[in-house]
Amino acid sequence: MTLETQSIHSPMIAKLETLMRLTDEERRAVSELPMNVRELREDHDIVREGDRPSQACLLIEGFAHRYQAMGDGRRQIMSFHVPGDIPDLLSLHLSVMDHNLGTLAPSKCGFISHQNLQALMRAHPRIGDAFWRDTLIDGAIFRAWLAGIGRRNAYARIAHLLCELITRMRAVGLQNGNSVRLPLTQEEIGDALGLSTVHVNRVVQQLRADGLITWHTKVLTVNDFEELKRAGEFDPTYLHLRNQAVAAAA
Amino acid sequence: MTLETQSIHSPMIAKLETLMRLTDEERRAVSELPMNVRELREDHDIVREGDRPSQACLLIEGFAHRYQAMGDGRRQIMSFHVPGDIPDLLSLHLSVMDHNLGTLAPSKCGFISHQNLQALMRAHPRIGDAFWRDTLIDGAIFRAWLAGIGRRNAYARIAHLLCELITRMRAVGLQNGNSVRLPLTQEEIGDALGLSTVHVNRVVQQLRADGLITWHTKVLTVNDFEELKRAGEFDPTYLHLRNQAVAAAA
DNA sequence: CGTATCCTTGAAGGACTTCAAATGTTGTGG
DNA sequence: CCACAACATTTGAAGTCCTTCAAGGATACG
């Protein structure tokens, strides 16, 4: 139970700032939230289907994903998570996990007890509203993926996903010019978008050939964001970022 | 602004009972919630993408769906809604709608102002929690659809959807033995599952030929629920119904 | 009873998958 | 710092599930 410096809480504060304008008082309360910090290796399951968590996990560093194992051994990835996200916040009100949550890269996680989260929300109702809002944005992202998998071809699907990840990472300050560190394999992209690895590969090569992206050694660079957005029919409204200007910026 | 008898509030109470056990006091508060009741024709848009609602819509009778229009004129349906649902509850915390909400059948809707909803939740925090929980279950349903569209073939997808609808309608008392009134066309099923109408038709015929269902004149009858669940890999956990026994019952 | 909507059927084509194998990259221990 | 294993990307070829196009029946409703 470490009560640490600002650094481990700052991704959470950056994330909350995308949801609401924090007062100094609220910022202080968040930065005093007791967290149990742990380093997790790549491909570690944080919570599993069937679990009944008594705490939630703040991703401080690294990359995570939600997924479900299918009957035939395949899997469906339902979301990717970046630092600042609390992917299992839903366990506050959904006692049994209906999916798995795991890391995709070596990660640092801060575990916060449900009790402490409840206390924070009681003391600061606007933060409680922001948490609810965050789970609703999660839902909006699921809907956007649904539209992609259901009605877009592989090219548009992949373009859309890359736009989303860039935009979300940019919103919490994780970009580097037009580049982001994306520790995703093509297999994972496929498992998220309902595509085979082989086909993801061919389409990614097409995106490269079209001059839209460079993607090498886990670093994705967008060379033509406008065209990538057009290709993926990407409209950032569904991310409901407080500062839409940030989201819209090329 | 009608303050009506129990009948118009009862679908909402039935729905809340699937989320929590209501006290008499809470039941009374819900049944006194001011609602503006309107009859809506088939295929009427209740709220549209870009709207900023100041009220939420309780579906009292009928059938509704959430959908998004795609660039090429096709659409993706993201959820179906049955009486008791408040499909745009998310507008409480997401000011701009990122999708459309419309009826699929002649429907009766009760419009409740955000103010009155907020007041109800302030006076009865457990009801507020139940509402949050309900929006989380919405999200769980999106994830389940994601898994279906991403990783299951048409046969399993359709079987899964039918299991879900039957289970949800059963939970609020809308079943009739093994039958439910399902005012969905095969085209709408296709738009929900990312399939063409033609293919939906062929697969539905297969489901009939396999003796799993009868589906005629908007009435769906499940002849072999166990087999239908197996075909769709359906596990009702994700619906997070308070009384799981209800959900599991054949 | 006519018209719109929905369901059904056949045939051809396409987007994506599967299988199989080669090439490239990363990390680890000697 | 090289060798080697494990993993990720890439390529080719064949096959499949589903789509598209086109048209004929059935059903519902004013």
Image: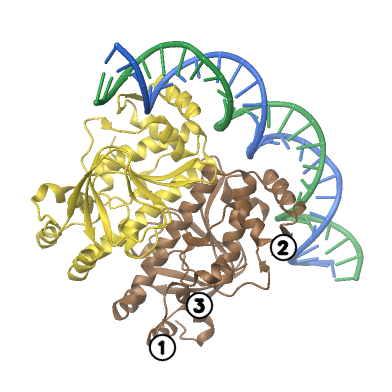
Chain colours: A brown, B yellow, C blue, D green
Name the side, left or right, on which A215 lies relative to B224: right
In the image, taking residue A223 as reference, residue A98 lies left or right, namely left
**Most foreground residue, B16 or C30:** B16
Instruction: Give the amino acid type for the residue marked by disc 1 in the picture.
Output: Asp
Q: Are marks 1 and 2 in contact (CB under 8 Å)?
A: no
- Position of B202 relative to B9 (above/below): above
Q: Earlier in the sequence, mark 1 or mark 2?
A: 1
Disc 3 residue type (three-letter): Ala
Does A200 sit above or below residue B249? below
Where is the N terminus of chain A found, in terms of image quarters?
bottom left
Does the image show residue B103?
yes
Query: N-terminal of the two: label 3 or label 2?
Result: 3
Q: CA distance from mark 3 to mark 2?
A: 26 Å
- The CA distance from mark 1 to mark 3 is 13 Å
Badge 2: how crowded within 10 Å, few (<14), some, or many (20+)?
some
- Residue at image mark 2: A223
In the rendered image, which residue does mark 1 sit on? A24
Amino acid under disc 2: Asn
- Dividing the picture into quadrants, the one containing residue A153 is top right
Q: Chain of mark 3?
A: A
Q: Residues within 10 Å of mark 1 (few under 14, many from 20)?
A: few
At 35% from the left and 65% from the top, the residue drawn is B93
Which residue is nearer to you in this view: A121 or B235? A121
Q: Residue at x 39, y 43 (%)?
A: B235
Percent position of residue B164, x then y: 35, 40
Q: Quadrant of the C terminus of chain A?
A: bottom right
Is A105 situated left or right of B73 in this image? right
Callout 3: SS: helix
Identify the residue at image location x=35%, y=33%: B184
Q: Which residue does the numbered mark 3 point to in the structure image?
A: A14
Taking the image as shown, residue A79 lies to the left or right of residue B160, namely: right
